[in-house]
Amino acid sequence: MTHSPDSSKAHSDNTLDDVPSGGRVLGFLVAFFAVMIAGLFALPTPTEESQVAAGDGDSADGSFAILGVRAFDGEKMLTEVDLLVTAGRIAAVGPGLEIPEGVARIDGAGQTVMPGLIDAHVHSWGSARSDAVRFGVTTMLDHFTGLDEVTAARQDREAGGATDRSDLFSAGTLATVEGGHGTQYGVAVDTVDSVEEVPEWVAARIAEGSDWIKIVVEPGWREGINTLDMERVSALIREAHARDVLAVVHVSRLDDALAVTELGADGLVHVWRDRIPTAAEVEVFKASGIFVIPTLVVAEGMADPSPSMAMAEGEWGTRLSDAQRAGLNQRFPAEAALPMDVPKESVRLLYEAGVPILAGSDAPNPATAMGLSQHRELALLVESGLSPLAALVAGTRTPAVAFKLGGPARGTLEVGAIADLVLVDGDPSLDIAATRRLTDVFKAGRRINLAASASTAEEIVAAAPEETLLSDFEDGLKTRYGFGWGETTDSIRGGASVATLTVTDGALVVTGEIKAGAMFPWAGAVVFPGPGAMEPVDLSARSELRFRVRGDGRTYTAMLFSGDMTGIPPTRTFSADGEWQTVVFALDSFNRADPSTVRGVAFTAGNPSGSFRFELDDVEIR
């Protein structure tokens, strides 16, 4: 369908990147999207112990010895000692140990053995636990995830056997309000809407298996956001303590951090970014006994992701899964970037005052990767005034103590502790970058395979057609080339959103409803320019995606599927009001897209929940 020039609006080239994920097409198209998002969201199947391969230096029952090694024991560095592991537990540490006959031995000369790292702030799902352990993170503290993940993690811990995944402790569902931070992901969240609801709310979290209570005080991440008032925050802290669990609080402003500290919060799970505290304000934190997880790496990723990207090069890059690489390649909106001087100086002041500092990455936020980002966090703590030795403590013993992880002990090499171990070249107490020179990781005494999963096989890529116009909808849903149109919704990930496609007056009409229930809800239309659904076509000679749109005033997302179809597809956002407008996106503005293997283009609605309606016409890749 064509329109006269006077009916169009000005050219639109929006720049914000959203983070919807994957899609579903009716019937047989489901499988193609399932492959695309499997790297990020498919829950791993527990593996048999035999899959954690035993080789030189470990035995079938998780017993081995490391000889003549430098050892960081969670607090201090020991030189030239032996370490004996028996049945997945640390049996002895010291010089000249008598090693039982038949126990496998590792030459530790020039290396350092240390407890497995503890990432004190993650959000875990999908392959997160198996991705993190390959980078030496053997325990993760999760601050918001689904109940299924919490249940599976607890079952793994209680089973007590060796696995090829990090152990996970979690707050489960966070405490927020309707429309508050934590509700924007489409997951159904049990909000705290009154003080009277607090006891029942906390009891429900503990019954679900939450290991502590996570509270959100966030009035500023977007305009008009709702947040908990201090009366409810105080009630949540008191109720958590009455049930003998910790209460930690998400903050982004110093005044909020001070307020919740005075209410008795046990920990802050971010450091503020608005101003540097005065000496009197630092004393408030010191006197309270509160701990702080700064998550500097995610703040840095908002401003300058290049240090994290540099870590993904070389040998380490070969260990990255598709999910980890996808996370690193995502970007925050440009307006999220703030200078790092406030958080770094705040951390320095807190550390010098004796406030416990815990290392946590907040992965998998944009520009982060599970496991890998914890090593960048350690470096940022050093840049903020901690010694390398203090940074190691922040990434091992301190989180275990602060979160009362209990037996068997973690973050230490004491006798009886779980043998979650990292072996690195060099001395990380002198050079924190040595933690990146991993030579071995052991989970409960079993060696972890550090290799990432194999890449996808090569496939035939169709040549580009001469035609550039995909659809003008004069013949219904038929396309000038390619496989055609279909519906896509979040139901493939357990969501409930719906979409319907019809053609009216020579335009595609997309209607539906976004419903809570998926981590990233979406619904809309997808078109495949290749010969089959998700089959690639070479459009490298083309430069732009062009289409006409009008709608209900919502903001919508264009997703470009290309390449190996793993990770979150690159996106651009556009508005659709009541008048027809032409939207043009340069193909190279879809970050990480590969125009030589274009597989599909989706046009979707996302949050907030509710009904939507938009119309498309003259969809063209030229």
Image (cartoon, rainbow, N blue to C red):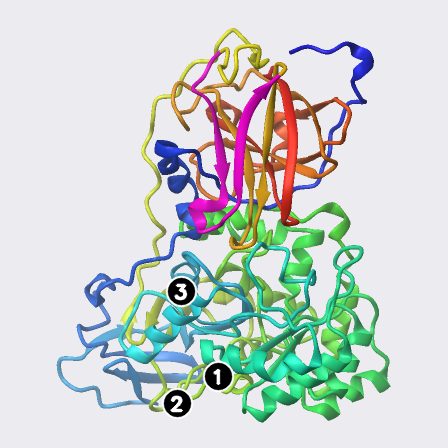
* Magenta span of residues: 481-504
Residue 213 vs residue 343, the one in the foreground:
213
Percent across and percent down for residue 493 are 44, 49
Percent x, y for residue 525?
A: 54, 31
Residue under label 3, please give it.
133
Tell me the number on the disc at residue 504: none
Contact? badges 1 and 2 (CB < 8 Å) = yes
Point 76% across, 31% down: residue:
577
**On the image, numbered disc 1 is attached to which residue?**
74
Mark before the other along the chain sequence, 1 or 2: 1
Quick one: SS at disc 1?
loop
Residue drawn where x is 69% and y is 23% of the image:
584
Q: Mark 2 points at which residue?
A: 414
The Cα atoms of the two marked residues, 1 and 2, are separated by 9 Å
**Mark 3–mark 1 distance (CA, rounded to whole Å):** 18 Å
Q: At 73% across and 76% down in the image, what residue appears?
A: 348
Q: How many labels does the image show?
A: 3
Q: Nearer the viewer, residue 146 or 297?
A: 146
Left or right? Give the position of 618 relative to 219: left
In contact (CB < 8 Å): disc 2 and disc 3: no
Residue ID at (79%, 81%): 259
Q: Give amino acid for label 2.
A: Glu
Mark 2 to mark 3: distance in Å? 21 Å
**Per the image, is 333 magenta?**
no
Residue 438, above or below 517: below
Dot 2, crowdedness within 10 Å: few (<14), some or many (≥20)?
Answer: some
Please tell me which of labels 2 and 3 falls first in the chain. 3
Mark 3 Cα within 10 Å, few/some/many (few <14, many 20+)? Answer: many
Q: What element carries label 3?
A: helix
Q: What element carries label 2?
A: loop
